[in-house]
């Protein structure tokens, strides 16, 4: 236990010190946290085997997985607060169109590229694995995106659309993966399961949104009975922890396996709460401050999980490069054409696709499920390789795109919400 505490402390301090170096180099803090995790992980310092000095095995990193899950819950809860009725009225249809189209186009391009690779050399990759990787490509990591937005206090049309798109991306990706994985299984076994392909993903989405909506309403009802800021903060944190725990529940109804999506549950909790609670803005600002150390730990642990062994496999490198290039092209073109179709601004149309490149936890979870395929280990290693690249490069590209769109302001002590509140007051004063 003492070794775990020392390691957690080292992760926090090391991540913060590394972020100072990253700031001088003009890199986002999230990149510094990921590099810190790589250095402390089982392939660098952790390999020395000194208790408390880094993570000496993959199991040591997995032992702290509950911290990562909790951090994802708070990230989804925060993003859910972006779905306010005022914004949904003006952007709701646009968000849905962009969110679905960019994911479908990405999946189609990756499928085409990898299936083409199969026909060029059938020994490289099977069609079932190609189809599965295409669906995994649709997933976008909300954590890295949110951290960049927070650090640089980005605000504007692109930022608003980006946060909403990554929020619904989990639902879209879940459906695409379930369908593609079902098709892949049918190609290998010759049998198609309608329950696995269509029923289970729809049930998971409905259950997740229902549980999140109920939790958000109950949170508001409980918050009304307290007026102390510290007590309201404690209740909010408690409810997010509760929804994270409940979202891990699984059960069987007949032949249908039922479960919840952590991201969707916590996102819906935040969405309902922010739309029925008139003091949610102030409360969310306090929650953001409380969760700052948790977010650092999340990215340090994410960096420690990155498997450097995959770099030594030429087959994984070849398929990984094709996957990364086709996915990046799919995200950019998908966002570009969907934004153009919904008449987004020129800057949003031009830069949204670049901000959707980061990929991490959701994709790794899908890859873990895909290991049951005949060459599922290869699928997992390709995703691990792509996550290694995207997590290290993606935040920097997101920062560049938001800066080019004019939505990153000079750093100050104000939070994103305080910046938005100041802008709102200025607009009201000018009327």
Image: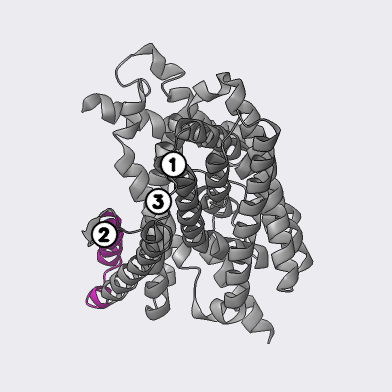
Q: Residue furthest front?
A: 190
- What range is drawn magenta here? 221-247
Above-or-below relation of 237 to 67: below
Q: Does 337 sit left or right of 267 as displayed? A: right
User: CA–CA distance between discs 3 and 1?
Assistant: 22 Å
**Residue at x 69%, y 40% (from the top left corner):** 116
The residue that mark 1 highlights is 370
Query: Residue 46: x and y, percent?
Result: 39, 19
Q: Dividing the picture into quarters, in which one does residue 101 lie?
A: bottom right
Above-or-below relation of 15 to 166: above
**Which mark is in front, 3 or 2?**
2
Q: Does 193 sit left or right of 157 as displayed? A: left
**Residue at x 28%, y 56% (from the top left corner):** 241
**Residue at x 66%, y 68% (from the top left corner):** 157
The residue that mark 2 highlights is 255
Q: Secondary structure at mark 3?
A: helix
Answer with mark 3 or mark 1, whichever residue precedes in sequence: 3
Answer with mark 3 or mark 2, whichever residue precedes in sequence: 3
Above-or-below relation of 128 to 159: above
SS majority, magenta = helix
The residue that mark 3 highlights is 72
Q: Which mark is drawn over residue 176?
A: none
Q: Secondary structure at mark 1?
A: helix
Q: Residue furthest top?
A: 48
Answer with mark 2 or mark 1, whichever residue precedes in sequence: 2
């Amino acid at each position: 236990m003492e070794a775990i505490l020392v390691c957690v402390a080292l992760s926090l301090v090391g991540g913060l010190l590394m972020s100072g170096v990253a700031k001088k180099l003009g890199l986002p803090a999230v990149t510094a946290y990921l590099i810190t995790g790589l250095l402390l992980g089982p392939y660098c310092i952790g390999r020395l085997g000194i208790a408390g000095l880094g993570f000496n095995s993959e199991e040591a990193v997995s032992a702290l997985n509950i911290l990562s899950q909790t951090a994802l819950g708070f990230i989804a809860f925060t993003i859910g607060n972006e779905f306010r009725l005022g914004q949904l009225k003006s952007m709701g249809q646009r968000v849905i169109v962009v969110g679905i189209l960019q994911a479908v186009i990405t999946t189609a391009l990756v499928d085409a590229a990898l299936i083409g690779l199969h026909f060029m050399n059938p020994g490289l990759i099977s069609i079932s694995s190609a189809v599965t990787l295409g669906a995994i490509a649709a997933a976008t990591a909300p954590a890295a995106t949110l951290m960049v937005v927070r650090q640089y206090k980005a605000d504007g049309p692109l930022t608003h659309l980006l946060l909403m798109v990554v929020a619904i991306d989990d639902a879209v990706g879940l459906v695409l993966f379930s369908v593609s994985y079902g098709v892949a299984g049918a190609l290998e076994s010759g049998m198609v399961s309608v329950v696995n392909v269509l029923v289970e993903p729809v049930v998971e989405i409905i259950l997740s949104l229902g549980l999140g909506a109920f939790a958000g309403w109950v949170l508001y009802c409980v918050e009304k009975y307290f007026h102390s800021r510290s007590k309201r903060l404690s209740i909010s944190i408690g409810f997010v922890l509760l929804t994270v725990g409940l979202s891990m529940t699984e059960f069987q109804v007949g032949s249908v396996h039922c479960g919840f999506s952590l991201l969707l549950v916590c996102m819906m909790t935040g969405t309902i709460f922010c739309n029925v609670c008139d003091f949610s803005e102030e409360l969310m600002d306090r929650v953001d401050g409380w969760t700052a150390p948790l977010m650092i730990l999340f990215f340090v642990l994410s960096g420690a999980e990155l498997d450097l062994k995959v770099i030594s496999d030429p087959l994984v490198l070849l398929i990984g490069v094709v996957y990364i290039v086709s996915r990046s092209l799919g995200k950019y073109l998908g966002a570009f054409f969907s934004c153009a179709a919904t008449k987004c601004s020129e800057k949003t149309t031009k830069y949204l696709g670049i901000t959707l490149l980061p990929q991490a936890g959701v994709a790794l979870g899908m890859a873990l499920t895909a290991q049951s395929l005949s060459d599922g280990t290869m699928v997992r290693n390709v995703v691990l390789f792509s996550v290694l690249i995207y997590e290290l490069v993606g935040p920097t590209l997101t920062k560049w795109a938001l800066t080019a769109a004019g939505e990153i302001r000079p750093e100050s002590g104000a939070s994103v919400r305080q910046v938005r509140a100041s802008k709102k007051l200025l607009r009201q004063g000018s009327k």
